[in-house]
Image: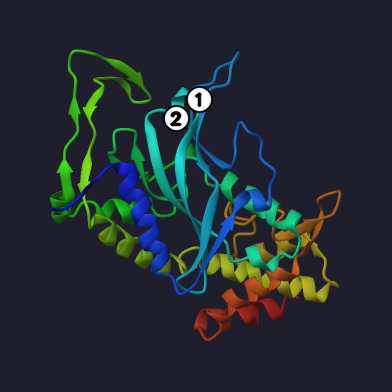
Amino acid sequence: MTKHLSGEELLEKTYNELCSKSETREKITFSDFIEFSRYAPGLLCEIADDSDFHRTRKGYMLYTEGSILDFSDTKWLVCFGKAWGSYPAQSYGNDISAFEATLFNGYESKEEKAEYLELIFRRGSYFHNSLIHTRSNGIMGVITKGEFGRKTIFGEKMSLFFENAELKKYIAQKPEYDERYFVFQDNGLVHPCSKNVMYMEGFEKILANKMAGLLKETDNALFNYNDILLFDVLLKISNKDNGIVNIKKISETCGELGIKPFFDVRYDDYYMFEFDKGKNNFRIKESSKKYMQKRIEKIKNTEEYDNYLQRINGLL
Protein backbone atom coordinates (compact mmCIF):
# COMPACT_ATOMS: atom_id res chain seq x y z
CA MET A 1 0.00 0.00 0.00
CA THR A 2 1.34 3.43 -0.99
CA LYS A 3 2.20 5.57 1.99
CA HIS A 4 0.68 9.03 2.30
CA LEU A 5 2.94 11.93 3.27
CA SER A 6 2.24 15.20 5.04
CA GLY A 7 3.65 18.38 3.55
CA GLU A 8 6.55 18.33 6.02
CA GLU A 9 7.33 14.65 5.33
CA LEU A 10 7.21 15.25 1.58
CA LEU A 11 9.63 18.18 1.69
CA GLU A 12 12.02 16.37 4.02
CA LYS A 13 12.10 13.33 1.73
CA THR A 14 12.50 15.64 -1.30
CA TYR A 15 15.45 17.34 0.39
CA ASN A 16 17.19 14.01 1.04
CA GLU A 17 16.44 12.80 -2.49
CA LEU A 18 17.86 16.02 -3.96
CA CYS A 19 21.05 15.64 -1.90
CA SER A 20 21.50 12.10 -3.18
CA LYS A 21 21.58 13.37 -6.78
CA SER A 22 24.62 15.58 -6.24
CA GLU A 23 28.08 14.43 -7.32
CA THR A 24 29.35 15.38 -3.87
CA ARG A 25 27.65 16.28 -0.58
CA GLU A 26 29.26 18.19 2.26
CA LYS A 27 27.05 18.42 5.33
CA ILE A 28 27.54 21.47 7.53
CA THR A 29 26.03 22.36 10.88
CA PHE A 30 25.70 26.10 11.28
CA SER A 31 26.35 26.07 15.03
CA ASP A 32 29.90 24.92 14.21
CA PHE A 33 30.53 28.42 12.84
CA ILE A 34 28.06 30.68 14.65
CA GLU A 35 27.07 30.88 18.31
CA PHE A 36 23.27 31.07 18.40
CA SER A 37 20.97 32.08 21.22
CA ARG A 38 18.32 29.72 22.55
CA TYR A 39 15.68 32.04 21.09
CA ALA A 40 16.87 31.42 17.54
CA PRO A 41 19.03 28.27 17.36
CA GLY A 42 19.93 28.69 13.70
CA LEU A 43 20.10 31.00 10.70
CA LEU A 44 16.91 32.90 9.90
CA CYS A 45 15.23 34.21 6.75
CA GLU A 46 12.39 36.63 7.36
CA ILE A 47 9.13 35.53 5.69
CA ALA A 48 6.37 37.60 7.36
CA ASP A 49 6.01 40.84 9.30
CA ASP A 50 3.08 42.22 11.27
CA SER A 51 5.05 44.79 13.26
CA ASP A 52 3.89 48.32 13.97
CA PHE A 53 5.22 51.38 15.79
CA HIS A 54 5.09 49.90 19.28
CA ARG A 55 5.86 46.20 18.82
CA THR A 56 7.72 43.75 16.60
CA ARG A 57 6.05 40.58 15.35
CA LYS A 58 7.89 38.67 12.64
CA GLY A 59 7.95 35.19 11.19
CA TYR A 60 11.00 33.36 9.88
CA MET A 61 12.26 30.20 8.28
CA LEU A 62 14.83 28.61 10.58
CA TYR A 63 17.79 26.59 9.28
CA THR A 64 20.17 24.66 11.56
CA GLU A 65 22.14 22.73 8.93
CA GLY A 66 22.55 22.29 5.22
CA SER A 67 24.37 20.39 2.48
CA ILE A 68 26.77 21.88 -0.06
CA LEU A 69 25.86 20.17 -3.33
CA ASP A 70 27.67 20.09 -6.64
CA PHE A 71 25.52 19.99 -9.78
CA SER A 72 27.71 22.16 -12.01
CA ASP A 73 30.33 24.89 -11.64
CA THR A 74 28.20 26.46 -8.93
CA LYS A 75 28.13 25.04 -5.41
CA TRP A 76 24.69 25.18 -3.81
CA LEU A 77 24.02 25.20 -0.08
CA VAL A 78 20.64 23.46 0.09
CA CYS A 79 18.69 23.58 3.36
CA PHE A 80 15.47 22.23 4.82
CA GLY A 81 13.80 24.96 6.88
CA LYS A 82 10.91 25.16 9.31
CA ALA A 83 8.66 28.07 10.26
CA TRP A 84 9.87 29.90 13.37
CA GLY A 85 9.04 32.96 15.42
CA SER A 86 5.93 34.90 16.32
CA TYR A 87 2.36 34.35 15.05
CA PRO A 88 3.05 35.64 11.48
CA ALA A 89 4.96 32.36 10.92
CA GLN A 90 2.13 30.13 12.09
CA SER A 91 0.48 29.82 8.68
CA TYR A 92 3.72 28.44 7.17
CA GLY A 93 5.25 24.99 7.43
CA ASN A 94 8.60 24.18 5.84
CA ASP A 95 10.71 25.00 2.81
CA ILE A 96 13.68 23.89 0.74
CA SER A 97 16.03 26.74 -0.11
CA ALA A 98 19.22 26.86 -2.16
CA PHE A 99 21.93 29.49 -1.63
CA GLU A 100 24.91 29.97 -3.89
CA ALA A 101 27.90 28.85 -1.81
CA THR A 102 30.75 28.60 -4.29
CA LEU A 103 32.90 30.90 -2.17
CA PHE A 104 32.25 29.19 1.18
CA ASN A 105 35.23 26.84 1.21
CA GLY A 106 37.49 29.59 -0.12
CA TYR A 107 37.56 31.10 3.36
CA GLU A 108 39.97 29.68 5.89
CA SER A 109 38.78 31.21 9.14
CA LYS A 110 35.65 30.29 11.05
CA GLU A 111 34.79 33.99 11.37
CA GLU A 112 34.84 34.58 7.60
CA LYS A 113 32.66 31.53 6.98
CA ALA A 114 30.21 32.71 9.63
CA GLU A 115 30.03 36.16 8.04
CA TYR A 116 29.44 34.64 4.62
CA LEU A 117 26.65 32.38 5.90
CA GLU A 118 24.89 35.22 7.73
CA LEU A 119 25.05 37.38 4.61
CA ILE A 120 23.61 34.90 2.12
CA PHE A 121 20.78 33.98 4.47
CA ARG A 122 20.01 37.64 5.13
CA ARG A 123 19.64 38.03 1.36
CA GLY A 124 17.18 35.12 1.25
CA SER A 125 14.28 36.87 2.98
CA TYR A 126 10.71 36.39 1.72
CA PHE A 127 11.49 33.13 -0.05
CA HIS A 128 14.01 34.71 -2.42
CA ASN A 129 16.06 31.49 -2.48
CA SER A 130 13.22 29.04 -1.89
CA LEU A 131 12.63 26.20 -4.34
CA ILE A 132 9.35 25.29 -2.65
CA HIS A 133 7.56 25.80 0.65
CA THR A 134 4.47 24.52 2.43
CA ARG A 135 1.77 26.21 4.41
CA SER A 136 0.85 24.87 7.85
CA ASN A 137 -1.96 22.82 6.27
CA GLY A 138 0.48 21.09 3.89
CA ILE A 139 -0.42 23.02 0.74
CA MET A 140 2.69 23.58 -1.38
CA GLY A 141 3.58 27.06 -2.56
CA VAL A 142 6.02 28.87 -4.81
CA ILE A 143 6.78 32.60 -4.54
CA THR A 144 7.65 34.36 -7.81
CA LYS A 145 8.04 37.87 -6.35
CA GLY A 146 9.14 38.65 -2.82
CA GLU A 147 9.97 41.79 -0.90
CA PHE A 148 9.48 45.03 -2.88
CA GLY A 149 8.53 43.02 -5.96
CA ARG A 150 12.01 41.46 -6.23
CA LYS A 151 11.89 38.38 -8.44
CA THR A 152 12.84 35.20 -6.61
CA ILE A 153 15.57 33.03 -8.09
CA PHE A 154 13.56 29.87 -8.74
CA GLY A 155 9.93 30.99 -8.43
CA GLU A 156 8.90 31.44 -12.06
CA LYS A 157 10.29 28.14 -13.30
CA MET A 158 8.91 26.19 -10.35
CA SER A 159 5.48 27.76 -10.84
CA LEU A 160 5.49 26.67 -14.50
CA PHE A 161 6.38 23.16 -13.36
CA PHE A 162 3.33 23.04 -11.09
CA GLU A 163 1.02 23.94 -13.97
CA ASN A 164 1.43 20.36 -15.18
CA ALA A 165 -1.98 18.74 -14.62
CA GLU A 166 -0.34 15.32 -14.28
CA LEU A 167 0.98 16.29 -10.86
CA LYS A 168 -2.55 16.23 -9.40
CA LYS A 169 -2.39 12.44 -9.22
CA TYR A 170 0.15 12.77 -6.38
CA ILE A 171 -2.41 14.46 -4.11
CA ALA A 172 -3.77 11.75 -1.83
CA GLN A 173 -6.06 14.01 0.20
CA LYS A 174 -7.22 17.53 -0.47
CA PRO A 175 -7.53 20.00 2.41
CA GLU A 176 -10.87 20.18 4.23
CA TYR A 177 -12.09 23.23 6.13
CA ASP A 178 -14.41 23.67 9.09
CA GLU A 179 -16.90 26.27 7.86
CA ARG A 180 -18.34 26.78 11.34
CA TYR A 181 -15.37 28.92 12.37
CA PHE A 182 -13.09 31.67 11.15
CA VAL A 183 -9.48 32.41 11.98
CA PHE A 184 -7.23 35.34 11.14
CA GLN A 185 -4.19 34.49 9.02
CA ASP A 186 -1.79 36.48 6.89
CA ASN A 187 -4.18 36.09 3.94
CA GLY A 188 -7.19 37.39 5.87
CA LEU A 189 -10.21 35.80 7.52
CA VAL A 190 -10.35 32.09 6.62
CA HIS A 191 -11.98 28.86 7.74
CA PRO A 192 -9.60 26.70 9.81
CA CYS A 193 -8.27 23.58 8.13
CA SER A 194 -9.73 20.41 9.63
CA LYS A 195 -7.80 17.99 7.39
CA ASN A 196 -4.40 18.78 5.94
CA VAL A 197 -3.21 17.95 2.45
CA MET A 198 -1.59 14.54 2.04
CA TYR A 199 0.62 13.42 -0.84
CA MET A 200 1.46 10.11 -2.47
CA GLU A 201 4.86 8.63 -1.71
CA GLY A 202 7.03 8.86 -4.79
CA PHE A 203 6.20 12.51 -5.43
CA GLU A 204 9.51 13.41 -3.76
CA LYS A 205 11.42 11.83 -6.67
CA ILE A 206 9.56 13.98 -9.22
CA LEU A 207 10.22 17.14 -7.21
CA ALA A 208 13.89 16.30 -6.61
CA ASN A 209 14.48 15.63 -10.31
CA LYS A 210 13.01 19.01 -11.19
CA MET A 211 15.04 20.83 -8.53
CA ALA A 212 18.30 19.15 -9.55
CA GLY A 213 17.74 20.19 -13.17
CA LEU A 214 16.88 23.71 -12.09
CA LEU A 215 20.04 24.06 -10.00
CA LYS A 216 22.14 22.91 -12.97
CA GLU A 217 20.62 25.40 -15.40
CA THR A 218 20.54 28.27 -12.90
CA ASP A 219 24.34 28.13 -12.79
CA ASN A 220 24.43 30.11 -16.02
CA ALA A 221 21.59 32.43 -15.03
CA LEU A 222 23.05 33.71 -11.76
CA PHE A 223 25.20 36.24 -13.57
CA ASN A 224 24.27 37.76 -16.91
CA TYR A 225 26.71 39.04 -19.52
CA ASN A 226 26.81 42.49 -17.96
CA ASP A 227 27.75 41.02 -14.57
CA ILE A 228 30.63 38.99 -15.97
CA LEU A 229 32.02 41.91 -17.94
CA LEU A 230 31.86 43.93 -14.73
CA PHE A 231 33.95 41.22 -13.06
CA ASP A 232 36.50 41.57 -15.85
CA VAL A 233 36.65 45.37 -15.48
CA LEU A 234 37.14 45.01 -11.71
CA LEU A 235 40.03 42.60 -12.16
CA LYS A 236 41.73 44.72 -14.83
CA ILE A 237 41.57 47.88 -12.71
CA SER A 238 42.73 45.94 -9.65
CA ASN A 239 45.73 44.51 -11.52
CA LYS A 240 46.65 47.92 -12.96
CA ASP A 241 46.36 49.84 -9.67
CA ASN A 242 48.24 47.50 -7.31
CA GLY A 243 45.16 45.65 -6.12
CA ILE A 244 43.08 48.77 -5.38
CA VAL A 245 39.75 49.50 -7.07
CA ASN A 246 38.52 53.07 -6.88
CA ILE A 247 34.72 53.30 -6.94
CA LYS A 248 34.68 56.53 -8.97
CA LYS A 249 37.06 55.02 -11.53
CA ILE A 250 35.04 51.83 -11.90
CA SER A 251 31.85 53.86 -12.38
CA GLU A 252 33.43 56.08 -15.06
CA THR A 253 34.99 53.13 -16.90
CA CYS A 254 31.77 51.16 -16.88
CA GLY A 255 29.90 54.23 -18.11
CA GLU A 256 32.25 54.47 -21.11
CA LEU A 257 31.74 50.78 -21.86
CA GLY A 258 27.97 50.78 -21.38
CA ILE A 259 28.21 48.32 -18.49
CA LYS A 260 25.97 48.65 -15.45
CA PRO A 261 28.47 49.81 -12.80
CA PHE A 262 26.44 49.23 -9.66
CA PHE A 263 26.91 46.00 -7.80
CA ASP A 264 23.84 43.81 -8.00
CA VAL A 265 22.01 42.62 -4.87
CA ARG A 266 23.50 39.16 -5.40
CA TYR A 267 27.08 40.10 -4.70
CA ASP A 268 27.56 43.69 -3.55
CA ASP A 269 28.80 42.97 -0.06
CA TYR A 270 31.80 42.39 2.10
CA TYR A 271 32.21 38.70 1.34
CA MET A 272 33.72 39.57 -2.07
CA PHE A 273 35.43 42.87 -1.29
CA GLU A 274 37.41 44.57 1.47
CA PHE A 275 36.50 48.27 1.66
CA ASP A 276 38.62 51.04 3.11
CA LYS A 277 37.23 53.17 5.92
CA GLY A 278 35.97 55.88 3.62
CA LYS A 279 34.29 53.36 1.28
CA ASN A 280 35.97 55.06 -1.70
CA ASN A 281 38.26 52.15 -2.52
CA PHE A 282 38.22 48.41 -2.07
CA ARG A 283 40.29 45.30 -2.71
CA ILE A 284 38.95 42.09 -4.22
CA LYS A 285 39.43 39.09 -1.94
CA GLU A 286 41.63 36.33 -3.41
CA SER A 287 38.85 33.74 -3.26
CA SER A 288 36.60 36.16 -5.14
CA LYS A 289 39.24 36.70 -7.84
CA LYS A 290 39.34 32.98 -8.59
CA TYR A 291 35.55 32.90 -8.73
CA MET A 292 35.42 35.86 -11.12
CA GLN A 293 38.10 34.40 -13.38
CA LYS A 294 36.19 31.14 -13.62
CA ARG A 295 33.10 33.02 -14.77
CA ILE A 296 35.06 35.08 -17.29
CA GLU A 297 36.57 31.94 -18.86
CA LYS A 298 33.06 30.93 -19.98
CA ILE A 299 32.65 33.96 -22.26
CA LYS A 300 36.19 34.45 -23.53
CA ASN A 301 35.66 32.84 -26.94
CA THR A 302 32.68 35.00 -27.88
CA GLU A 303 32.52 37.87 -30.36
CA GLU A 304 30.99 40.14 -27.70
CA TYR A 305 33.98 39.61 -25.40
CA ASP A 306 36.42 40.35 -28.24
CA ASN A 307 34.61 43.64 -28.94
CA TYR A 308 34.67 44.48 -25.25
CA LEU A 309 38.44 43.85 -25.08
CA GLN A 310 39.09 46.27 -27.92
CA ARG A 311 37.13 49.00 -26.16
CA ILE A 312 38.56 48.51 -22.66
CA ASN A 313 42.15 48.30 -23.88
CA GLY A 314 41.71 51.82 -25.24
CA LEU A 315 40.49 53.07 -21.87
CA LEU A 316 42.92 51.51 -19.40
The local secondary structure at tag 1 comes to loop
Does residue 223 show up?
Answer: no
Amino acid, disc 1: Ser
Q: Left or right: 82 with respect to 166?
A: right
Q: Which mark is residue 89?
A: 2
> What is the basis of the colouring in this image?
rainbow
Foreground residue, 104 or 128? 104
- Badge 2 marks a residue whose secondary structure is helix
Q: Whole-percent x and y of residue 49?
A: 50, 27
x 38%, y 62%: residue = 18
Outermost front residue:
1
Above or below residue 147? Residue 163 is below
For label 1, the crowd category at 10 Å Cα-Cα, with few meaning under 14, some 14 to 19 and many 20 or more, is some
Q: Which residue is mark 1?
A: 86
Q: Position of residue 21 (x, y in %)?
A: 38, 69
In the picture provided, is 159 more to the left or to the right than 147?
Answer: left
Residue 22 vertical position relative to residue 297 in the rendered view, above or below: above
Give coordinates of residue 94: x percent, y percent. 40, 42
Viewer-side residue, 268 vs 175: 175
Distance CA(mark 1)–CA(mark 2): 6 Å
- Residue count near mark 2 (Cα–Cα under 10 Å), binned few <14, some 14–19, many ≥20: many
Q: Residue at x 68, y 71 (%)?
A: 233
- Marks 1 and 2 close (CB-CB < 8 Å): yes
Quarter of the picture holding the C terminus: bottom right
